[in-house]
Image (cartoon, rainbow, N blue to C red):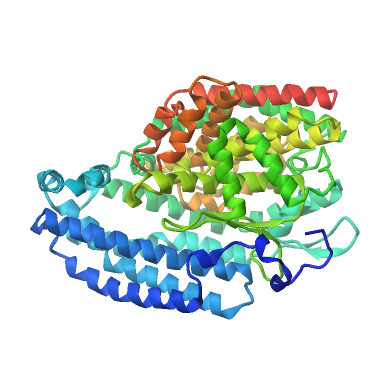
Amino acid sequence: MTKSNEVPERNTIPEEFKWNLEAIYPTFEEWQKKFDEVKDKIEAIKNYAGKLGEGSSTLLAFIKDDEELSLELNKLYAYANMKSHEDLRETKPMELAGLAESLLVNYSSAVAFFEPEILALPHEYINDCIKNEHELTRYEFFFRKLLREKEHVLSHELEVLLAKVGELKAVPENAFTLLTDADMKFPDIQDEDGNVTELTEERWYKFSRSSNRDVRKNAFTGIYGTYAKYKDAIGALYSGSVKGDIFYATTRKYSSSLDMALFGENVPESVYSHVVDTARNYSSKLMYRLVNLRKKVLGLDEFHYYDLNAPISHEPEDEIKFDDAVELALKALAPLGEDYTNNFKRGVSERWIDIYENKGKRKGAYSWGSYGTNPYVLLNYNGTLHDVFTLVHEMGHSLHSYYSRNNQPQVYADYTILLAEVASTTNEALLLEYLLKNSDSTERKKWLLDYYYNMVRTTFFRQAMFADYERQTHEYVEAGNVLTPDYLNNLWRDLNAKCYGPEMVIDPELCVEWARIPHFYSAFYVYKYSTGFTAANAFASAILNHEEGAVSRYLKFLQSGGSDYSLNILRRAGVDLTSAEPFERTMKFFEQRLNEGDDVWKI
């Protein structure tokens, strides 16, 4: 494939560049046949309701039937959605995706009895079932994790009431989405060529990276100035969301809303604190240096938030053909061993990857699939160095899924969100190291370092700042105080000043940035980006330093899926997030890269 100004139709792209979804279902007719079978099985599985306490054989029969059902259901769902993403103009795949979505909802409703019924049974009954049925021993951790929730489960009547309250809890987020996506309008600005263009959230991303400072500033003022006009309404919505979190935590007898959020994955609050404290402790040493470097390279007298994304390097323009991108990836990932690189090659040759852009194709990139399918990758490859990073990132996800699904039973094949970005980011770190070591171009080194700086800033420090904000706002309300826009603005100002330092001017518009962050309506989620980045850097550092057993421990991590609590899986692989060590290691790695930046930019 060569670059062209015109995006091709899908039917003009050779088959070898498309993913092979026919390996799941050869035809739509075969999909429909399986759909009808699953629909009948969903009705049949309802017959287990109220019978799980009748003995170990009944419990095992339900689990087997449920696994068989969910296996085919997830294949139906993944196939239909991926097929629809090939060309969003095609109606048939969209119809299948809608049917699969409805079927998934029906399934969830049909098996909703399972957890309450299990939690209502004595622990001794479950233990006896596991002893009596050898096949149930496989599910021991599954049941142990489920039964751990029992102390926070209420009576049937209160659980029904809480379920109904759940609709109210969703109101702040739904209202925020409608307000910011549908009702809120941003002003027009002039682009780099002087053309008047409508400002949107999507276009802000592009404008914030403009080499024209007036464009960056006007986009910043337009976006954040508009949010400032709605700060009272959005502040009330966020306050309602926080109160909802606290209501659920109190009702379910957790010590705090943060305790409730961490409980499910058995994460101690010390891990959350390591994220926040590391960012706080190292901002003055490292983030201030990064801001100063960017300020000097850009030649600015004053540095503002809208200068953070301004380019201080230029991405190499030479087109990297996809085959060459694969070769680069294989060389960079060679430290992981032949088994890993052979499976990477297998993914390419067996057409796991949908490579090129076509008209109507879903934008962006992702890794998807299910137990019983290949771990597919959607790309919109265009031959840039950034696209090579996207390739290794998404294949990191897919090979993590491949190893998990081929080494774990279905019940443990999926890894948790806490682990989800580790393998992909480890691959990126290995690629970055390889390219830096093998590049004789100063401009390429600048781009690579700038790429890494943006990653560590946005994935670690910014997410840690978000985590700090969430903890402070929830603790403030838990102490009996009321969130106001002025409190939120002042808190956000202080957090940004501490993160970026005295070299960055804190504009009044920046103080309302909290109002545009949708993640805050899913409380205490964002810290996982920082832990994932930390674990990945720890793995990459150990592998690149040839530490004894580092590669085998890492592959064991990939194979572990969700067979234990996430922190235990990481600990066995050599990364202990309950310790400060991996966070310190990540900061040392960042400092090393900043030193390299001082050399190439001659700061």
Above or below, comparing residue 35 to residue 152 in the picture: below
Residue 140: x and y in percent read: 23, 43
**What residue lies at 69% left-to-right and 34% top-to-bottom?**
432
Residue 197: x and y in percent read: 81, 64
**What residue lies at 81% left-to-right and 22% top-to-bottom?**
599
Above or below, comparing residue 94 to residue 74 in the picture: below
Above or below, comparing residue 497 to residue 359 in the picture: above
Residue 354 visible = yes
**What residue lies at 57% left-to-right and 56% top-to-bottom?**
350
**What residue lies at 56% left-to-right and 49% top-to-bottom?**
485
Residue 470: x and y in percent read: 49, 42
Which of the pair 73/458 is nearer the observer?
73
Quarter holding the C terminus is top right
Above or below, comparing residue 519 to residue 77 in the picture: above
Residue 301 visible = no
Which of the pair 243/62 is nearer the observer?
62
Which of the pair 38/364 is nearer the observer?
38
Which corner quadrant of the image does residue 253 belong to?
top left
Quarter holding the N terminus is bottom right
Count of numbered circles in the view: 0
Q: Is residue 23 left or right of residue 454?
A: left
Which of the pair 154/530 is nearer the observer?
530
Q: Is residue 227 left or right of residue 94?
A: right
Residue 458: x and y in percent read: 63, 40
Identify the residue at the far right of this view. 193
Which corner quadrant of the image does residue 159 belong to?
bottom left
